[in-house]
Amino acid sequence: MTTMPTTYSDLFYGISPYSWAYTGVGLALGTSIVGAAWGIFITGASLLGASVKAPRIRSKNLISVIFCEAVAIYGVIIAIILQGKISESHFAPGSAEYAKNAFSAYSIFWSGISVGLSNLVCGICVGITGSGCALSDAQTPETFVKILVIEIFGSALGLFGVIVAIIQSGDASFIKN
Amino acid sequence: MATIHPKAGTGDICSFNIQHGFAEALIRGMRSSFLVDPDYHHLTQCETLDDVRLNLTETDYSEALEDYNSLTPNTLQKAAVEKLVTEFQYLRTQTVEPLSTFLDFITYEYMIENVMLLLKGALSGRDINELLEQCHPLGMFKESTMRSIPTFDNTSKGYSDLYQTVLVDTPVGPYFAQFLKESAAHRGSDSRNVLEEVEIEIIKSSLIKFWIEDFYNFAMSLGGDTAAIMGEILRVRADTNAINITLNSFGTPLNEPAMRISDRKRLYPAVGHLYPAGTTMLADVSDEEELGRVLELFPQYSAIWSIHSSGNGEKSIDDAFYERDVQMLELAFESQFHFAVFYAYVKLKEQEIRNLVWITECILQQQKDEIGKFVQVFSQHTPWRESKRR
């Protein structure tokens, strides 16, 4: 950049597309994993305590942990896809190619937010439900499958985020030099 | 008296499990150790205590009974209480603040009972070892502390000495301090009180009152579901105490007009649905009829009172209170991520122990028609559960 920004629009536009893009990748990965980890500790603590008196629930209720883990995997998949669209280029700001790169960068950033936030809350949701599942399975085995259905619906939330992120970033691609 | 401020919040559904998830899951696992409908059915069909023992070996009590050769109501109670205490202490070691303080609050009630038992025993000159055997294991202090309690006199100077040297370091110290402060302010330091023989009961009621208020303030400062559920449980408990104090005071010096306002009113806890309007009215009550009229104004208690006033020994007011309590405590298990389940578990286990002792006593004394008169815990056939199903 050879000119100093004079308006906010200049300042904003001057932020490198790469920072937007890689921040998006980081958010996609990071917030998804925060959600998954949150869910796993919520369900894991209850699972540990409940299996003291009812050891039979140990293996079955690992499904709740697996559902939470899936949320983290969604984040990893999207992060890998997103970062695959980014490639090095040297275009002057203001050129058409720079504009195309900027568009791709914004789209990658917000895809990352979409998938990250959805997976964050999905992970928490599956975790809390999994905790209830472990506790009630310990008392009444018949309730396990029913609560599992709730968890399946909960993990669909993360899937929504993945689908939208894929669509959002579909047109994004960096023009190589 | 300042209530201990909780060192952390309980956390809501997203963060409760960080600190307390394991402990809550433990106590919910222990819920499966309650006796169920078929167990009670078999027990009430038993003819001898050996049959009872045989049936109990198929429940969670099998290990607890191994150490005892013969089964009598006393040994059964002892074994069951020891089992409860072992579970409670295991749980207590797994908890962190503020849950550990909450569990400690549950034990203070038993500590108060033990202190009063020792003091009363000292008055009647019983042997200290015999008294220590009878103390409730959940409320034990250090052995040296407990041994020194009966050595004090039953005068106001004696009590202050007892407080300053022995009780001040124990968790029930603040309650005793408050009792002494109020007592001194009320009576003056040199007046002999008329109620010497009921003095011990008054001390105990006062200590329990301060404990309920302290526990209530602590639970409310925890906030969230714990405050909502535990607050309700303690309010109802405070009201039960107020009603019982009034009922038991009829026919004792505490019921005289002069003593009612000054002494009896001071025993009513400052929490509960009956406070402050109801307790003011209760303070003026002189007999059962007036008590009935006061309770008519409070819908939740008029139902219980009508059981007492109309029933002819079919069901006592204690039974009615137990039934209502058991329903509330069972409902505490219906939601997750709060502390009230711990209190509910201890109280429901106590109720179960009472049931077992009742059943074995009835079998021992061959009074089979009385055997059904207990309040079952987590029964599928309680009236309120059945009416919900319909």
Image: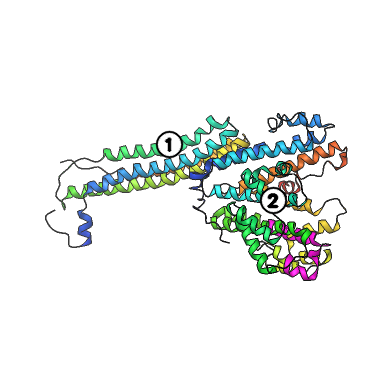
In depth, the one of B351 and A73 nearer the eye is: B351
Query: Farthest residue toward the left?
Result: A2
In magenta segment, residue A24: no
In depth, the one of B195 and A79 nearer the eye is: B195
B282 sits to left or right of A120: right
Chain to which the residue tagged by mark 2 belongs: B
B6 sits to left or right of B242: left
Residue B294 visible in the picture: yes
Give a yes or no on whether discs 1 and 2 share a subunit. no
- x and y, in percent, of residue A67 in the image: 47, 37
Disc 2 element: helix
Amino acid type for the residue under numbered disc 1: Ala
Distance between the alpha carbons at the discs numbered 1 and 2 = 67 Å
| Residue A132 figure quarter | top right
Question: In the rendered image, which residue does mark 1 sit on?
Answer: A70
Counting labels gives 2
Question: Which of the labelled discs sits on residue A101, or is there none?
Answer: none
Main secondary structure along the magenta-highlighted residues? helix
Q: The magenta stretch spans which residues?
A: B235-264
Residue A150 visible in the picture: no
Which residue is pictured at 77% across the width and 62% down the height? B195
- x and y, in percent, of residue B44 in the image: 81, 36
Disc 2 residue crowd, few under 14, some 14–19, many 20+, Cα 10 Å: some
Question: In the rendered image, which residue does mark 2 sit on?
Answer: B151
Disc 1 element: helix
Which residue is pictured at 79% across the width and 67% down the height? B285
Which residue is pictured at 56% across the width and 32% down the height? A57
